[in-house]
Amino acid sequence: MPIEEFITRVFCLIDDLYQQLFPTPLRQRGSAPKLADSEVITMEIVGEWQGHHTDMAIWKYFSQHWTVLFPAMPARSQFARQAANLWVVKQTIHAHLVHELGADTVDTHLVDGFPVEACVRTRAARCRSFKADAEFGYCASKKHHFYGFQGHLLIDARGVPVAMELTAANIDERDAAYDLIEKIAGLLIGDKGYIRPEFSKDCKALGIDIQTPLRKNMKDSRPKKFVKLLMRVRRRIETVIGQLAEYFEIERIRCRDLWHLTSRMSRKLLGYTVGVYLNIQAGRAPMQFEHMISA
């Protein structure tokens, strides 16, 4: 669809949900900002889809090209502050979209992790950002040591992101998964990193059947057709993580504190989910983003 139509559709969706989820004013004191909160979130989502991944780049893009749609453009610092303050709003809207799509109540989910680098590993000792929060970690799929955080993503079988957690890079992904799976049930597909008898036992107690590929030294009594199907379905979350990295650069950090990091991760996840939502509404494949936006 043309970019102007995309902006309009995103704004209508976000503004309708904002009015529904936040019927009373969020600000009790002070003057109202120049831009409505739904306008700011729209600009963030569209900016991310257009390849602008910092507050400065998003503000600059809309200041140069779309003042006809957003005439009350504030100063860059005001836009950045307002966007960062809306992290709870973005998470709430995302949760509502997930529920509306039924992604939290389906019987099949997938879970996996991905690295989020704070800086190049050789500069970690001199890096001042996230000093008390970032750690050294290892990404087995990329065979890569890194310094920063670990993202933990839960999706449904269609590719709809259900939830995401961000932890220090040295936190075991099985420990981080507990916060992701507390509200789901049914089949959960993960990689070999989720193999742990205690974790499987806890999943069973929650009504979750955790299935993973087995290590080479483990005997697999499951039917071969089931294992092949498991591996084929599991690639879906690898595709989602790859798209989040390609379209939103989710594996890179472009800020210096947890407040801005939380807000930007929230907008990336919301932006991707909005794309999936619009695809489903239009009758397209949920993860088919090529040519979704035309010039």
Image (cartoon, rainbow, N blue to C red):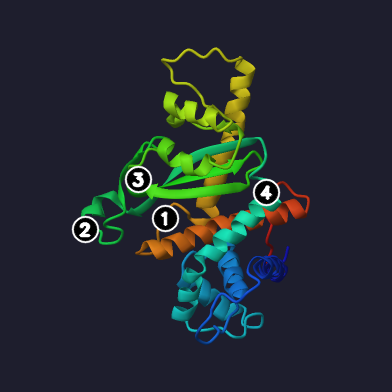
Q: Which residue shows up at 58% across the image and 58% down it?
A: 270
The three-letter code of the residue at mark 3 reads Ala
In the rendered image, which quarter contains the N terminus? Answer: bottom right
Residue 22 at what x, y percent from top left?
A: 63, 69
The three-letter code of the residue at mark 1 reads Arg
Q: For marks 4 and 2, give the one nearer the viewer.
A: 2
- Distance CA(mark 4)–CA(mark 2): 41 Å
Which residue carries the number 1 mark?
Answer: 252
Camera-side residue: 140 or 21? Answer: 21
Q: Classify mark 1: helix, strand or loop.
A: loop
Q: Classify mark 3: helix, strand or loop.
A: loop
The three-letter code of the residue at mark 4 reads Gln
Q: Sequence-wise, which precedes: disc 1 or disc 2?
A: 2
Q: Sequence-wise, which precedes: disc 4 or disc 2?
A: 2
- Distance CA(mark 2)–CA(mark 3): 18 Å
Residue 25 at what x, y percent from top left?
A: 60, 77
Using the rendered image of the protein, determine whether residue 189 is visible from the camera's viewpoint.
Answer: yes
Q: Are marks 3 and 4 in contact (CB under 8 Å)?
A: no
Which residue carries the number 3 mark?
Answer: 169
Q: Classify mark 4: helix, strand or loop.
A: loop
